[in-house]
Amino acid sequence: MKIFLDNIIYTKTLNGGVSNYWFELTKFLMKQENIELAFFEDEKAKSNFHRKELPISTNKIITTKSTPVLSRLMPIKYKTEEEFIYHSSYFRKLSGAKNQIEITTVYDFIHNYYSTFLNKTVHNNLKFNAIKRSKGIICISHTTYNDLKKFCPPKAHQKAEVIHVGVSDDYYPLLNFKPKGSILEKYSLEMDYLLFIGGRTNYKNFDFAAAVINHNTKLKLVIVGGGSLTDKERQLFSDEALQRIHFIPSVRNEELNILLNHAIALLYPSSYEGFGIPVVEAMRAGCPVIGLNNSTINEVASQSALLLDKLDISQFEQHIENLRNNDFRKKIIHSGFEESQKYSWEKSSRETFEFYNQFGL
């Protein structure tokens, strides 16, 4: 079997969940026998955090033009008569190849719910065309699959499956850990802290995290990733609360595992996610999750997260009070750890490879 992977996600972003997904899938495929891999990418891809870790031989790379704004929109031109699987990391079209079997992974439908009309139109034109072209469609959660049927239903000739994404083995409970010299000492994280991981766009409800810290003077907030805090975001906090905030631009998995192990909780008030990888990472590391009650977190965490029916400070404070009870905390951590065992990158990648094999190449 010959598989062409389009590494456009590495050009689009320096890090993030989709980049991580593509990295893990690629690692798995590179280890498989009896397949031939080739990659489409441009020079900018090598700036990506995950791409730097992939030992791809130059003779496996078909270089595309580096056009930052148009790279996602412009098709790759590649003429060949051979049969192969073509899987783009972010909906880019491959033209000129007559016998390709296109596979598309659909991550979410956030743009349909939260983007401006213009952004939604541009993004959906790209994504929906990819879905309609594809013989195989992978959704990373049942939530995403239900949205697929709602916004761009697959046809009878197309195969569509749910294949959950995974979680790294770098996340696990730490025993007898000594904080000296670690990231905890670096950021002076002696008092209880909440973790907020990733993007802070509107549907992520970062303003609720700010309200929590403004209200509860016994907590710090550690923000990981998502870009530097803007002036508008800083204005959400009182002057006193700003002294209890630590922003960490990026961390290795090992460092994030330390942060998760010692946090009082991961605060995940997002209104919508395609999957929500940080939730599973937290559960695997033994960190309780406080999240907004929605279909995704119910799917991923089941009964193992502490859910807010609405973004309400009093509900949050009740969850924090419960977590200060050792027996309750141990129970929720155990439940989360058991739930997290359902997910792994090996399982996700193996099921994706099996999905490719359904097309008989």
Image (cartoon, rainbow, N blue to C red):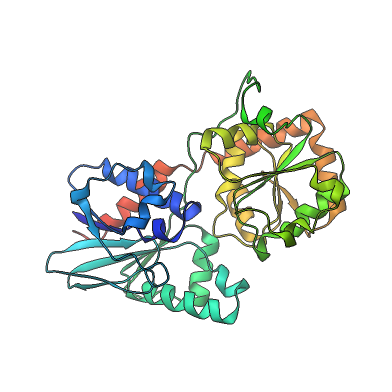
Please tell me whether residue 76 is drawn above or below residue 239 in the rendered image.
Answer: below
What is the quadrant of the C terminus in the image?
A: bottom left
Tell me where residue 332 sits by quadrant: top right
Q: Is residue 250 left or right of residue 87?
A: right
Tell me where residue 187 sits by quadrant: top right
Residue at 64 percent across and 19 percent down: it is 178
Please tell me whether residue 3 is drawn above or below residue 55 in the rendered image.
Answer: below
Relative depth, front residue between 354 and 217? 217
Q: Is residue 163 left or right of residue 35?
A: right
Residue sitting farthest toward the front: 231
Spot occupied by residue 246 in the image (x, y as percentages of width and height): 71, 42
Tell me where residue 172 sits by quadrant: top right
Spot occupied by residue 243 in the image (x, y as percentages of width and height): 80, 43
Spot occupied by residue 58 in the image (x, y as percentages of width and height): 22, 48
Residue at 67 percent across and 65 percent down: it is 202
Can residue 160 be seen in this snapshot? yes
What is the quadrant of the N terminus in the image?
A: bottom left
Residue at 66 percent across and 23 percent down: it is 179
Spot occupied by residue 68 in the image (x, y as percentages of width and height): 41, 67
Can residue 36 be seen in this snapshot? no
